Structure formats: C-alpha cells, structure tokens
Amino acid sequence: MSFDLLETWLAKNPEAVGCKRDGQSIFRELALFQDYHGLPAFKKALVDFMAEIRGNKVSFEPNNIVLTAGATSANETLMFCLAEHGDAFLLPTPYYPGFDRDLKWRTGVQIVPIHCTSSNCFRITASAIEEAYQQAQKKNLTVKGILITNPSNPLGTTMTRPELNLLINFITDKQIHLISDEIYSGTVFNSPSFISIMEALKDMNMEKNNRVHIVYSLSKDLGLPGFRVGAIYSNDPTVVSAAMKMSSFGLVSSQTQYLLSVMLSDKKFRNHYIVKNQNRLLKRQRKLVSGLEKSGIRCLKSNAGLFCWVDMRHLLNSDTFEAEMELWERIIYDVKLNISPGSSCHCNEPGWFRVCFANMSEDALELAMQRLKSFVGSIKKHNHQESEKLRKESHIGKWIFRLSFQSFNEQDQR
C-alpha cells in the first residue's frame, strides 16, 4: 500500500540498489561469503527501527538478534530451539492459519488452542490459559510455551497490558517460554498504542527475562515479503547461539541486508514512512468498516494490522461451521471476494471472517463493497421470502385446522 514511498526513496538513493558506497562499488564485498551473524550495519539499523516503532520505550541489543529468511523461518527455528518432537505450545484463538504449517510440519510440535470468545472481544483470560494448559496435560503433552501474535492476526487488535502481565506471570509460574510474534508492530494506526512484550517486561523489572522471545519481520511493516527478512530477538544466549547455527539454512542475502541497512539508517525517511503508512492504513480500514456497515455487517473494533475481523453470523443458515463454509463459498464464487473463514483460524464460533483491506486499491475496495452489499441484499430478500412463505403456510394450516374443527363439531352436533 505504500510502495510509492519506498520507490521514491530508492530513486533518490540509487547507490543502495547499485551496490555502491560513497560512489565506489562494493559488489565484490557483498558477493563473497558473509558472516552468518549478519552485516553489523544492518543489525544496528534493524534494532533501531524496532525501537522507534515502539516509541523508543525499549531498546534492543544487536548481538541478541538472529536474522532469518522471514518470520516463518524465525518461528520454526524457535520451535526447534525450545521444544522436542511431541511437545506442545499454547496459542490463543483465533490465530494465523499458517502456524499449523510453520510450527508443526517439520518440528513435530503440537498446538493446543487457548479458546478466546467474542463475549469479551476475544481477549485472553486466566481461565482460558489454565484450561488449555490442563487440556494439554490430559493429552500427556509437555507444554514448552505460549506463542502470541501482537498485534493480532486475524483480529487486528493490540494486546492490553493486563493480558501481557497475565502471560508473563503464567509462564514465570510454569517455567515455560513465551514467544511474541510482533511482525505487525509498525501497523498500529489507532489507539490504544502498541505495547511490546519487552515494554511489559521492563515495567515489571524483568527486561532481562530469558524465557521471552520476539519474532520480527519487515514483510508487514515495510511491505517487503519477497525480501524474506525476519529476526529472532532473545536475551537467552543459548537460544541465540542455537538459532544462529540454524540460520545457516535460511540466510538473508548480503545485498538485501546492505540495501535495507542504508534505507533504515535514514531516520528522516523511516519516521516519515511509519507515520504515512499508518495514516493510510487508518483511512483504508475506515473505508472498509463503513462499506461493511452499509451492508449491515459489523466488525470487531480494530486498531492495527492489515485486516478486519468481520462478523457475518447473522448471514448463516445455521449456527454451524458447515453453514460458515457454505457462506464462504458463495462469497468466493458469487461476490469474487477472497476472504478467510474463521474456522481456518481455529475460531470456535461460526460466522467470523478475516477480510484484508491493504492488498487492494481503493477502487477495488469500493467495487468489493458494492458487490457485497448486493449479495447481502439478495440473502435478506431470500430470507424475507422464505419467512413470508412459512408465515402463509402457517396461516393456511391454522385456517384449515379451524375449518376442519368446525366441520367436525357440526357433524358431531348432527
């Protein structure tokens, strides 16, 4: 959505793309074997960028960061570092569907859901965490940690301080790990502001906690998923060392690191980009919410991310996941709108859908809202006709019953 800002910067800084520094080629320097630890200039620029996104309320040590080929690689690497095959991690629902692949496929780690509900806007509660933990134990699974996404995908919300404190206290009590996937931290476009897990730890005088780890990426905050730039941040030297060794299977190219080190070292640009991108996200989110409301559809109140958590429960034929899939297929084929059903995010309430608003133009979004409004109108019309049909059938049935009862009485009197 903000590629124009990146392209403008690149046009003004051609040396970053052309592998030059102060007019001199550094192609040979970048093309030869690099230290697996990553380019120092890039790691410094990255941790400064992470701190700026968090309002400089916390700082990060470059030596505690491990570069990976995207957040997917970072999350899988942490699973290998923290758990054995058959161990479990607890994840609040609804969660990103890709975690079923990223966390489980090659590691053998099991996911146990922490079921959150719409009754409290899908907030994490102590009872929900404890219930998930007990459920894992009943299955003879060893719980090694909890993984959260903050801001949340798919909810588009940021976690509250009480939620973060609850999680920290729980993992401290159980002596397990907490992974905070914060790849959407730079997309917070409205209040309340983003609170990083590191900020919560600092406020509890636990900033050196070695059981809490952060996953970060430039795929969302800079819109560069093709660059495959992710990172693990940890205060545990053992985790950093193990992850560093594993990172050799998914390195970030030195050319990519150099380009981004120059870009992120430009403080004026990165500040301008963050503010401008967040303003654009807010404008686009409001347009989506407004368009949905015109169709009689509401969303969970959101303040971050690239999507809205949309409530279409009233459009279901029945309160079942089968009805949810039926509605989803109709939206895919009739409306031509690609959305994600809540069941794919392990939501335990049928009728919720994730709708992304940042991957289309304003014209495309406007067209999508028009189509959806027409679709909802056709459903309401059909439901009204069915209701009228049932009402008439019921009325006729009662009329026939009265006539039959009256005829019976007349015959009885004869």
Image: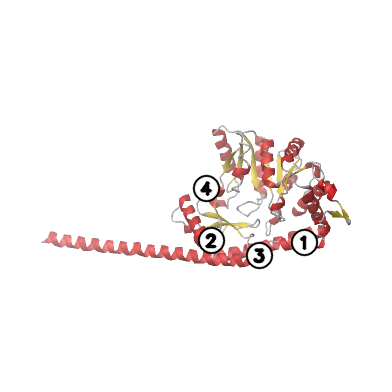
At label 3, the amino acid type is: Lys
Where residue 203 sits: x, y (%)? 74, 46
Image quarter where the N terminus lies is bottom right
Of residues 161 and 305, the one drawn nearer to the viewer in this rendering: 305
Image coordinates of residue 131 in percent, x first then y, are 56, 40
Q: State the SS at label 4.
A: loop
| Mark earlier in primary sequence (1, 2) | 1
Q: Work out how far the residue at label 3 is from the one at label 1, CA to CA, in angstroms.
A: 17 Å
Are there few (<14), some (14-19), or many (20+) residues within 10 Å of tag 1? few
Residue 283 badge: 3
Q: Are marks 4 and 1 in contact (CB under 8 Å)?
A: no
In this view, the residue farthest toward the left is 414
204 is higher (above) or lower (below) than 192:
above
Question: Residue 365 appears at what percent x and percent y?
Answer: 60, 65
* Label tally: 4
- Measured as percent of width and height from the top left, residue 272 is found at 77, 61
Task: Give the residue type at disc 1.
Answer: His
Residue drawn where x is 17% and y is 62% of the image: 407
Q: What is the number of the mark on residue 272?
A: 1
Q: Secondary structure at mark 2?
A: loop
Amino acid marked by disc 4:
Asn
Dot 3, crowdedness within 10 Å: few (<14), some or many (≥20)? few
**Residue bearing mark 2:** 336
Q: Out of 197 and 139, give the one closest to the viewer.
A: 139
The residue indicated by pointer 4 is: 348
Q: Earlier in the sequence, mark 4 or mark 3?
A: 3
Sequence order check, earlier mark of 3 and 1: 1
Q: Residue at image x 55%, y 47%?
A: 346
Distance of mark 4 from mark 3, alpha carbons? Answer: 31 Å
Whichever of callouts 4 and 1 sits on the residue coming sooner in the sequence is 1
Reading the chain from its start, which is encountered first: label 4 or label 2?
A: 2
SS of the residue under disc 1:
helix
